Amino acid sequence: MARISIRSIRYRRPLNPTWDTELEQQIHCHIEGIEAPLDFTGLFQRQAPLHVEIGFGKGRFLLAAAERFPETNWLGIEYAPPCVALAAERAARKGLRNVRIARGVAEDIITARFPADTVAAYHIYFPDPWPKKRHHKRRLIKPPFAVQLARTLEPGGFVNTATDNSEYFEEIIAACTDAGLARRDVPDTYADDAFRTNFEIRFLTQGQPVYRAAFRKPGP
């Protein structure tokens, strides 16, 4: 889950909304009411490669990527309700029918509800590093979850990650490689400024290092 202060999100719906509210309701999918395992073709009402962003925060990357690549289905999972509401509204305003946004704990949703071999790529950018040692158990990318990422990836699928914490970066590398994911060069598909998250923009502006890695599931 991306680090974000809930107080920094001020979500106020305009009195006279001009966007498609039915589309917004479709985008904000309540997956707790959908039978498991999830049927992504039914969820998106089409068959297309599925990319999942975990902890999308204000949705900058998710919406930019969905707008740039309409041939791909984009699912965002976020725990913070204001972020979910804000991203769903923004996606509807843009008319992005290839986006679905769900609220919940990503580890629980993916472990319990994602079928094997169904995700083309995961995007996990700047998850909370929980820097204090006693809090490390709260980190998102740990060995058990890395196994679930590997299980649900399609053969040849990717996990794309970034963090500003060098110690956590080494932990991510170890967890993913131990789960059978091979480290690869980071794809340059999302290299331009339009895809930078709010956290990355802040870190780069402050001159802080950013550590990136991609991991590929063996396959064609």
Image (tube, rainbow, N blue to C red):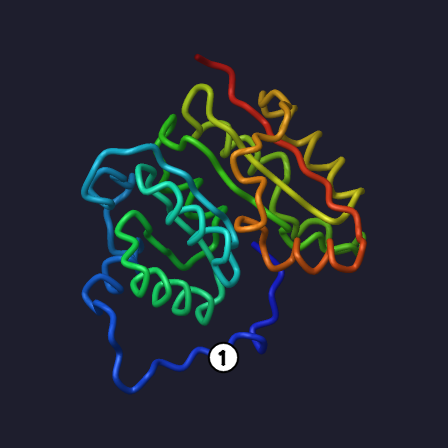
* Above or below, comparing residue 111 to residue 135 in the picture: above
Residue denoted by label 1:
10
Q: Amino acid at mark 1?
A: Arg
The residue at the point 79 percent across, 47 percent down is 209
Quadrant hosting residue 174: top right
Quadrant hosting residue 178: top right
Instruction: Find residue 109 and report its horizontal and vertical position in percent.
Output: 41, 47
SS assignment at label 1 = loop
Which residue of the protein is positioned furthest toward the bottom in this rendering? 15
The residue at the point 73 percent across, 53 percent down is 204
Instruction: Find residue 17 and report its horizontal and vertical position in percent.
Output: 26, 78
Q: Is residue 115 left or right of residue 148?
A: left
The residue at the point 58 percent across, 23 percent down is 181
The residue at the point 28 percent across, 43 percent down is 36
* Above or below, comparing residue 182 to residue 208 in the picture: above
- The quarter in which the C terminus is drawn is top left
Q: Nearer the viewer, residue 157 or 180?
A: 157
